[in-house]
Image (cartoon, rainbow, N blue to C red):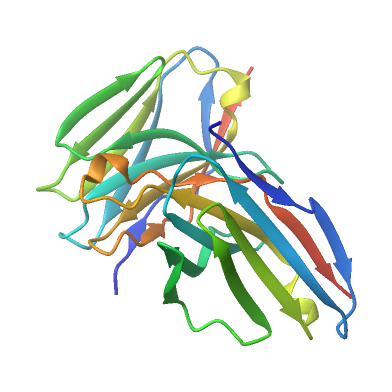
Amino acid sequence: DTEVTQTPKHLVMGMTNKKSLKCEQHMGHRAMYWYKQKAKKPPELMFVYSYEKLSINESVPSRFSPECPNSSLLNLHLHALQPEDSALYLCASSHQSQRISYNEQFFGPGTRLTVL
Amino acid sequence: QKEVEQNSGPLSVPEGAIASLNCTYSDRGSQSFFWYRQYSGKSPELIMFIYSNGDKEDGRFTAQLNKASQYVSLLIRDSQPSDSATYLCAVTDRDDKIIFGKGTRLHILP
């Protein structure tokens, strides 16, 4: 299995809603990532989990809350979002190894989020 | 401030010709270098990965890395209309943090 899967594919939510994005991989990767991508912009790193521990938080607002229940799963809990948070949310995973040849990040298909 | 620079394009190349995409990076400690292809509305797809100086070939794609010049390029031979996409150059640092360039839009002319 060489895939990163994400659900849902599309999500429309109001500013008072609580929702969650889910990401799963079964490649044995020990690093997982959340990115946000706006139209015609590169992906922006939000969070990195390494061995199920949060290792990088790129000063993301607290209305985004990541969770890594186990080495295969990564969630992003959303609460009280703003319309400007509308974007494509991408999950990625990679090996976590001293051998740099294992550093490729593989992206899931993304969740297209619209905040009304 | 670690930076990855790419020409935004669009780069227009006739079908069957060689497309040449370039990228420079600022951090000399960068270890791994990637090229991702992204179609509009889709997620980035890894097409090439290189970490040693020199060339790496995979099918119609060749990545070239020159660490002394802090330069990485991607050549696409026999360009096809399906190669039309945005190509993102990405670089990882010692903390495994990936930094993306803004991407180059490539348009293959039929």
The quarter holding residue A48 reads bottom left
The quarter holding residue A35 reads bottom right
Count of number-bearing discs: 0
- Tell me which residue sits at (45%, 16%) in the image: B17
x, y percentage for residue B56? 26, 25
Q: Is residue A35 above or below residue A84?
A: above
B27 displayed left or right of B83: left
User: For the N terminus of chain A, which image quadrant?
Assistant: top right
User: For the C terminus of chain A, which image quadrant?
Assistant: bottom right
B86 displayed left or right of A64: left
Q: B57 or A95, which is in the foreground?
A: A95
Q: B109 or B22, which is in the foreground?
A: B22
x, y percentage for residue A30? 41, 53
x, y percentage for residue B74? 35, 32
Q: B107 or A70, which is in the foreground?
A: A70
- Tell me which residue sits at (16%, 37%) in the image: B52
Q: Is residue B49 above or below residue B79?
A: below
Residue reaching furthest left? B68
x, y percentage for residue B107? 58, 32
A116 displayed left or right of A107: right
Residue reaching furthest front? A70
Q: Is residue B59 above or below residue A68?
A: above
B38 displayed left or right of B54: right
Q: Is residue A106 above or below residue B20?
A: below
- Tell me which residue sits at (62%, 23%) in the image: B82
